[in-house]
Image (spheres, rainbow, N blue to C red):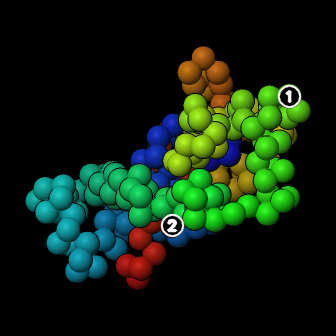
Amino acid sequence: MFHDGRAAALEEQTGGPPLNPAEMGMPDKASVAARLRENESYGAAFPETFGPGILDDPEAAFDALAQAVAAFERTDAFAPFDSKYDRFLRGEATLSDEEELGRVLFFSEQFTNCSQCHRLALSPMDPRETFTDNRYHNIGVPENKALREANGVALGRSIPVSGATRPSAPRTSAESSARRPFATSR
């Protein structure tokens, strides 16, 4: 997850924003749990979903938050496959001449070979194509020192991932950053 691959799982990624000073800036996991308790809907839903007392334990509450956000991000509501390309695949839209040329070039094995790395499905007409294998690929882009420093990630740090390496952040989800999970709870 992330462009630098520092989160190994969606739950690790979604746990980042609450504690990241550049995003939600909560001071600690106890503050996140308190914020969840303040919201009547969350105060009822979390114990119902994760068990009684879940919001009384900051570590457990924070992990439950990350699990809940990750579960939502895996739903069709979060990624509805409704771009013009998705509609084209369903026969609901027509591509312009330039778009069709781009599509042909993207899937061309003779000219560009883009789809060899940027296609998950076997068929170029798969209606749920995401154009990614969801793995980190080091393409030689230099480290963004300012961004890594702001996120507390040591320069040049890497850990093994499926036979490859990827830059990594410290191993707690609190030290990574991602989407803004419960912005409406304020």
Q: 123 left or right of 68?
A: right
Residue 172 point in image, percent of width and height: 47, 43
Quarter of the image containing the N terminus?
top right
Q: Tag 1: residue type?
A: Gln
Q: Which residue is mark 2?
A: 180
Of the pair 159 and 79, the residue shown nearer to us:
79
Q: Which residue is mark 1?
A: 110
Of the pair 25 and 44, the residue shown nearer to us:
44
Of the pair 116 and 24, the residue shown nearer to us:
116
Classify mark 1: residues with Cα within 10 Å, few (<14), some (14-19) or many (20+). few
Name which residue lies at 64% across and 39% down: 124
Residue 33 point in image, percent of width and height: 31, 65
Name which residue lies at 53% across and 49% down: 127
Relative to 27, is 38 above or below? below
Name which residue lies at 84% across and 50% down: 101
Q: Measure the alpha-carbon separation of dots 2 and 1.
A: 42 Å
Mark 1: which secondary structure? loop
| Mark 2 or 1: the one toward you | 1
